[in-house]
Image (spheres, grey):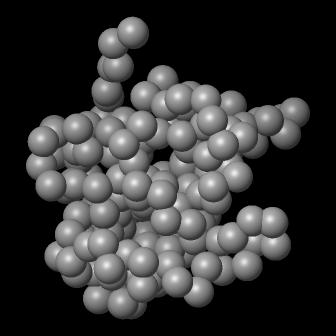
Amino acid sequence: MNAVVVEFASADPFRAAEERARSQGLPYRGALTPPEAYAVWKSGSDVTLVDIRTTAELELVGRIPKAINVEWKLFPDWELNPQFVTSIQRKFAPESVLLLICRSGIRSDEAARKLAQAGFENVYQVLEGFEGELDKEGRRRVNGWREHNLPWTQG
């Protein structure tokens, strides 16, 4: 197994994430880069990584070991999961530290906003998502969890 090298701009990733949220006017606690998210998730603190991608995405594209999956949208119609907030409320207290990750960062932003509205105080979005942005050829290999060589498994 290859060693995971984690790089981030700040000695305190939470502080950097919260500053990003303030500077961007985000209504939730913060926005972490994938390496920052991995570092705080694995730090031993009480942090949960919630992968909000569909089950189909996890099976076809890959998954993050030990991340909790609660779908934000449902496959194949991509309708919002009407039980998303309720599912999170059943599993976690409002003060829980939750890191939300999706494919590219769009859905995790939407879900983080919804959870903040529902009273969750410590919600962080994982920027770039699992697969990251599209390159010139339309492939997702610019950035994201996988491109940072963070732990993941195929299907």
The answer to whether residue 65 of the structure is visible from this angle is yes
Question: Which residue sits furthest left?
Answer: 45
The C terminus, quarter of image: top right
In the foreground, 83 or 23: 83
Image quarter where the N terminus lies is top left
Closest to the observer: 68 or 145?
68
Task: Give me the residue at 30% from left, 63% from top.
Answer: 98
Identity of the residue furthest to the right in this view: 137
Where in the figure is residue 137, as x and y percent of width and height?
87, 33
Task: Depth check: give the residue in front, 71 or 149.
Answer: 71
- Residue 131 locus on image (x, y percent): 63, 41
| Residue 31 appears in view | no
- What residue is rendered at 66% in x and 43% in y? 59
| Residue 64 rendering spot, x and y as whole percentages | 46, 39
Rendering quarter of residue 135: top right
Q: Is 117 displayed left or right of 43 in the figure?
A: right
Which residue is the extreme one toward the top? 1
Judge whether 29 appears above or below 56 on screen: below
Count of residue discs: 0
Instruction: Give residue 151's quadrant in the image.
Output: top left
The extreme bottom residue here reads 118
